[in-house]
Amino acid sequence: MASSFPNPFSSFAPTTSTSTSTPSPISLHPSLRLSPSPRFRNPRRQSLTVKASLTTTPGSPNVLLQVKNLTAVIAESKQEILKGIDLVVHEGEVHAIMGKNGSGKSTFSKVLVGHPDYEVTGGSMMFKGENLLDMEPDERSLAGMFMTFQAPVEIPGVSNIDFLHMAWNARRRKQGLPELGPIEFYSILYPKLESVKMDATFLNRNVNEGFSGGERKRNEILQLAVLGADLAILDEIDSGLDVDAFQDVAKAINALLTPNNSVLLVTHYRRLLDFIKPMYVHVMVRIIRFYAFSRIKNPTGRLNGNMASEDGKIVKTGDISIADQLEKEGYKAISVV
Ligand SMILES: Nc1ncnc2c1ncn2[C@@H]1O[C@H](COP(=O)(O)OP(=O)(O)O)[C@@H](O)[C@H]1O
Ligand SMILES: [Mg+2]
């Protein structure tokens, strides 16, 4: 499937001698982008700059991600999708964000990694004490964020192995470590392939080109397994997977968990949470308020319109019992005031 969003990574340029192809405009995973593009510059980043204010109590895990009252709009239409998201993730925690289709889960995930389709209009996002609003998507990636997409994109002209190798060496450079040649890199890559039960023939195919839905998801987890992440944001990682693939992927994700890294699982299926156990479950809703027949102006500025305002917000946080409640009673069980 072709990219469902405009090619945001068209400034991508291979930087290692191992790259055999010179891709024309391509879509590249934001968390793996290697060179900054002016298109990604957030015009509001200066005005939204906040000071690092993360506090750590001795003995307690460090705060990895702190999101406060985050609001964001679709860049093109300015329609507000996120309305005041609050979330704190510490090192070593697994969080799940659940919510109906259209509640803003993917939008929130993409805003965290700096997707250009969205503009942050307020609030703050801190990652390891750094202001994400001051960081380009590739900087966020190199700082340790990784996102798997609900619909992973193809990268025509770039083989899987070149892609992984380039991304790997970009991280090495950031860490001040020497780059690895193809043979050394392959010795690192090979066990990871086994961990996600992926055939080596996928390495020479272009990234996600002609891959089935399940193969794309495995490929995303392969990228995560190879590159590692302090915070992995996994958007509907279970969708499109058959039972065997689902278990392989869940096993591979669990194998990546350490006391220091964290996972944000975005899903609307309870089933995933049987395999990857979250410590916290958050429920995100889309609140629709109708203004029909109102005599006063609604927030869209129209009088007496039928327009609704749609707000993406986390309205409930708890443990796995919330997911059980959702499964039994549906989202109507989550009251929104
Ligand atoms: N790039 C976009 N252009 C237009 N509408 C969008 C875009 N991204 C998200 N939306 C809209 O925002 C709402 C939330 O979408 P999304 O974050 O994908 O929800 P979820 O992942 O919870 O299903 C939906 O109504 C969706 O159509
Ligand atoms: Mg989604």
Image (spheres, grey):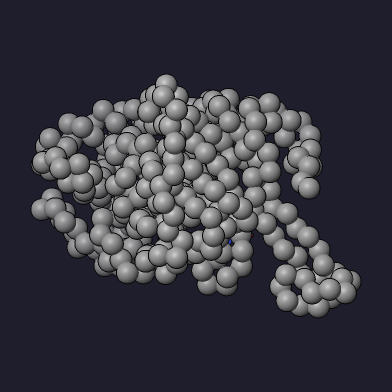
Residue 85 in the image, given as x and y percentages of width and height? 59, 49
**From where the camera sits, is residue 285 visible?**
yes
The residue sitting at 51% across, 68% down in the picture is 75
Residue 319 in the image, given as x and y percentages of width and height? 63, 27
Q: Is residue 26 left or right of residue 287?
A: left
Which of the 4 quarters of the picture holds residue 19?
Answer: bottom left
The residue sitting at 77% across, 46% down in the picture is 336
Residue 74 in the image, given as x and y percentages of width and height? 55, 65
Tell me: residue 111, above or below residue 174. Answer: below
Given residues 168 and 317, the one toward you in this image is 317
Residue 220 in the image, given as x and y percentages of width and height? 39, 42
Tell me: residue 13, above or below residue 281. Answer: below
The residue sitting at 41% across, 51% down in the picture is 51
Q: Quadrant of the N terminus?
A: bottom left
Q: Is residue 18 left or right of residue 199?
A: left
Given residues 319 and 70, the one toward you in this image is 70
Tell me: residue 326, above or below residue 14. Answer: above
Given residues 322 and 21, the one toward you in this image is 322
The residue sitting at 35% across, 38% down in the picture is 229
Residue lying farthest top?
A: 59
How many marks the image carries: the answer is: 0
Q: Is residue 14 left or right of residue 44?
A: left
**From where the camera sits, is residue 154 visible?**
no
